[in-house]
């Protein structure tokens, strides 16, 4: 019914069974979501709630308003607000050759690391798994595919700037 | 840090909402019930993602409302262990450094997980990393409001549902202060290179 479905194709499907939850008999099995997907979902929800606006049914939703506002505020400061489904897809394709786990790729996507020390934090046992050249290559892939904060990187290459121009965000 | 969790619940829709679209009413009820709440062993609920299946709705004798079993997916904040997160320092105390993400506050970095050697400055109520250089120790302060990168090393869920009168009486006699326990807490660590205040690791 909603634009939510857009995000559905994207999510990184690391499914696993969880221990049975106590509350109201909910059976939980789960998948990981990237910050970009949550950002997209929350902005759509905000838009939709603004449209239906002064509707009598929207009362009693203070909890939803609080949590969506706070979460959106946090996520808006992360690099994901400049991403798009195409960028994420391109990123995941490029990551195939690096032999990383899903959790590692997800964190690279969420954090957009710019230094080698950040890569070493995110990639487990990076000393054994990656050589220095591989870390450099990984950094290059991450920073060239994922768009940066527009004002954060003044000394960027022309190629990056051209890519941001296409970005609708 | 966010997960999509499949859940099943029975939703009660009161009769005065029957004129509305059932999906809309159910989405609203689920958000009313779950948003901004911690579900035990699942995490902090953010908002409804979608409804995957609606079973038949029933009206029971003596109650005009409809009861519908709903299969749905919810967005939940539940970082996995060893995940790297960025938050803001909310405060320091002898128990460690308290970190907030804005929407989630119950994160503690205990003293033994700080960059070593660390000491607590009683006068300023702030934790300090006594960073060793050739020119001697250099004090790096962890001030309130600074952005900090940390690793999630542990999580704990606390059942905060009300207890029966018998056990409540027993505990109140032993300890007087009714301390409010957080239902979901994360334990962080910054004892690795690259972790800690963002300003410590940006090359200048």
Image (spheres, coloured by chain):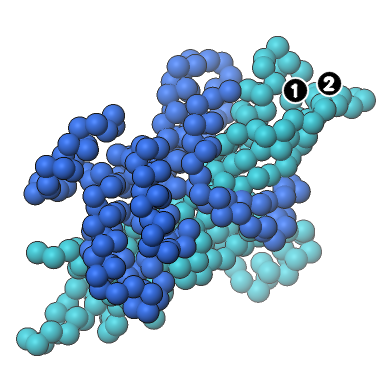
Chain colours: A blue, B cyan
Instruction: Please state if A80 lies on the left or on the right of B28 as rendered.
Output: left
Within 10 angstroms of label 1, few (less than 14), some, or many (20 or more) residues?
few
Q: Pointer 2 and pointer 1: residues touching (CB < 8 Å)?
A: yes
Measuring 75% from the left and 22% from the top, which residue is drawn there? B14
Image location of residue A120, percent across then percent down: 32, 70
Instruction: Please state if B105 lies on the left or on the right of A152 as rendered.
Output: right
Q: Chain of mark 1?
A: B
Instruction: Please state if A119 lies on the left or on the right of A52 as rendered.
Output: left
Q: Which residue is labeled 1 in the image?
A: B14
Looking at this view, name the residue that lies furthest to the right: B61
Q: Chain of mark 2?
A: B
Image location of residue B81, percent across then percent down: 50, 66
Measuring 68% from the left and 51% from the top, which residue is drawn there? A28
Upstream in sequence: badge 2 or badge 1 = 1
Looking at this view, name the residue that lies furthest to the top: B19
Q: Which residue is labeled 2 in the image?
A: B64
Please tell me whether mark 1 sits on a helix, a strand or a loop. Answer: loop
Observer-nearest residue: B123 or A68?
Answer: A68
Looking at this view, name the residue that lies furthest to the front: A97
Compared to A57, does B86 lie above or below? below
CA separation, marks 2 and 1? 7 Å
Q: Is residue B167 visible?
A: yes
Image location of residue B153, percent across then percent down: 47, 70
């Amino acid at each position: 019914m909603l634009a939510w479905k857009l995000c559905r194709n994207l999510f990184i499907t690391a499914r696993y069974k969880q221990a049975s939850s106590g509350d109201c008999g909910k059976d939980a099995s789960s998948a990981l979501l990237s910050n970009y997907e949550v950002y997209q979902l929350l902005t759509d929800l905000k838009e939709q709630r603004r449209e239906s606006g002064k509707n009598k049914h929207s009362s009693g939703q203070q909890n939803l308003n609080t949590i969506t506002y706070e979460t959106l505020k946090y996520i808006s400061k992360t690099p994901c607000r400049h991403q798009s489904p195409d960028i994420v897809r391109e990123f995941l394709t490029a990551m195939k050759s690096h032999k990383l786990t899903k959790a590692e790729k997800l964190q690279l996507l969420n954090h957009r690391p710019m230094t080698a020390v950040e890569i070493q934090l995110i990639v487990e046992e990076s000393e054994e798994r990656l050589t220095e050249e591989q870390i450099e290559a990984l950094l290059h892939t991450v920073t060239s595919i994922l768009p940066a904060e527009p004002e954060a990187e003044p000394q960027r290459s022309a190629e990056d700037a051209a890519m941001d121009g296409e970005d609708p965000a | 840090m966010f997960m999509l969790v499949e859940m099943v619940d029975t939703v009660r829709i009161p009769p005065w909402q029957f004129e509305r679209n059932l999906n809309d009413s159910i989405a609203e009820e689920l958000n009313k019930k779950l948003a901004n709440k911690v579900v035990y062993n699942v995490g902090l609920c953010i908002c409804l993602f979608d409804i995957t299946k609606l079973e038949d709705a029933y009206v029971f004798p003596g109650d005009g409302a409809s009861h519908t079993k709903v299969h749905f997916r919810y967005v939940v904040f539940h970082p996995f262990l060893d995940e790297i997160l960025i938050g803001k320092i909310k405060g320091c105390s002898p128990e460690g450094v308290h970190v907030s993400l804005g929407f989630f506050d119950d994160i503690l970095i205990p003293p033994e997980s700080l960059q070593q050697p660390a000491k607590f400055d009683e006068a300023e109520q702030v934790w300090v990393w006594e960073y060793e250089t050739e020119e001697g120790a250099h004090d790096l302060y962890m001030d309130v409001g600074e952005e900090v990168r940390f690793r999630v090393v542990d999580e704990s869920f606390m059942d905060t549902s009300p207890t029966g009168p018998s056990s409540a009486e027993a505990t109140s006699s032993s300890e007087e202060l009714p301390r409010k326990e957080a239902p979901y807490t994360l334990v962080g660590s910054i004892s690795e290179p690259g972790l800690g205040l963002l300003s410590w690791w940006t090359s200048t």
